[in-house]
Image (tube, rainbow, N blue to C red):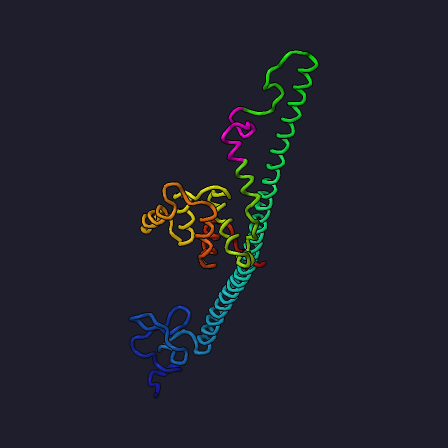
Amino acid sequence: MVDHSGVQGSVVQRGLYIDEVGRTRDAGTGAIHMPGFRRLPPAADITYVERLERQNAALEVENQELRTANKGLQCVKNAGAERIAALEKEKRMMLEEIDRLRVQVAVTFEQSRNHEIASMFLDHDNAEMRSHIQHISGQNAALASGLIGTPIDPTAGKLYSRGSISDMNSPAFDQYTQSIQGSVSVPALPSNPIERSKYSAADRVKCLLAKVGVAPGMVLSTDQCCEMQGALDGVNPDNEAYPALQDMCAKTCGTDGLPYEAAVNHFKSLSSASLAKAEKALRLTTVYFAH
């Protein structure tokens, strides 16, 4: 293009203007045009080289700002990655703590069961000790009566509370004696389901009957039969099939109840899977988690 105005450089296109830093912008939108298309207007007071230097300086400033922003974003990204690694580590620690607590619960349950067995034997020893003390008290009373020569109160020297478990003539003492005799005759099976399945069905049924309150020599009532049969079939009192279960147990036990041996023979013919389901429902077995 030939310059007829006598000014060095090309004439700026229509609709464009030069801003305060030497950028060529669109007059309508204010958009910056590419530096290669920027030209000096006629009668401009700065040279083409000076305007390019100003543009390069402005671009360098913008480039520096972008580097700073990029560095800040990189720092934020590194901090986020470190936080994610810390959270993953805390998650693994929590999972390990949960596994440790599960093992501790299993160990505590086994210790509690051992304590219950030990308490049962201690109660039996206490009963024998009370009987021995009563015998000694009777001997002391007879000796005192012989020394003094006058009869004394027949209840003197006897350690018991009327109507309680220490009173041999009370129903509580009879119930306690029956429970002791029943616990001695009921087999002690392991709480692990796999080990428990190796024992005979009769022993497993005796443990189930003892769990619902039926010891050897007693009779199985309708309510106890419903509790045991419900555990075998997986039917709870809130289930719609529970009334039918009650009718079946009422026919099985009758008005006088089902004798102990007949109850054992009735339930031992069931499958091992049904017995395992009842043992789990009545909390005779537990599952151990490996650590």
Where is residue 122 drawn, in percent x and y? 62, 38
**In this picture, residue 86 sits left or right of residue 56:** right
Residue 90 in view in this figure: no
Against 290, residue 55 (above or below) is below
Toward the viewer: 148 or 18?
148
Q: Over which residues does the magenta segment extend? A: 162-176
Residue at point 56%, 59% (across, down): 89
Residue at point 55%, 59% (across, down): 198
The secondary structure that most of the magenta stretch takes on is loop
Against 31, residue 156 (above or below) is above
Residue at point 55%, 43% (across, down): 183
Toward the viewer: 142 or 210?
142
Magenta stretch contains residue 174: yes
Against 241, residue 27 (above or below) is below
Total of numbered circles in the picture? 0
Where is residue 152 drawn, in percent x and y? 62, 14
Q: Give the quadrant of residue 271.
A: bottom left
In this view, which residue lies farthest toward the right?
147
Toward the viewer: 44 or 56?
56
Where is residue 135 drawn, in percent x and y? 64, 26
Where is residue 128 drawn, in percent x and y? 62, 33
Toward the viewer: 282 or 211?
211
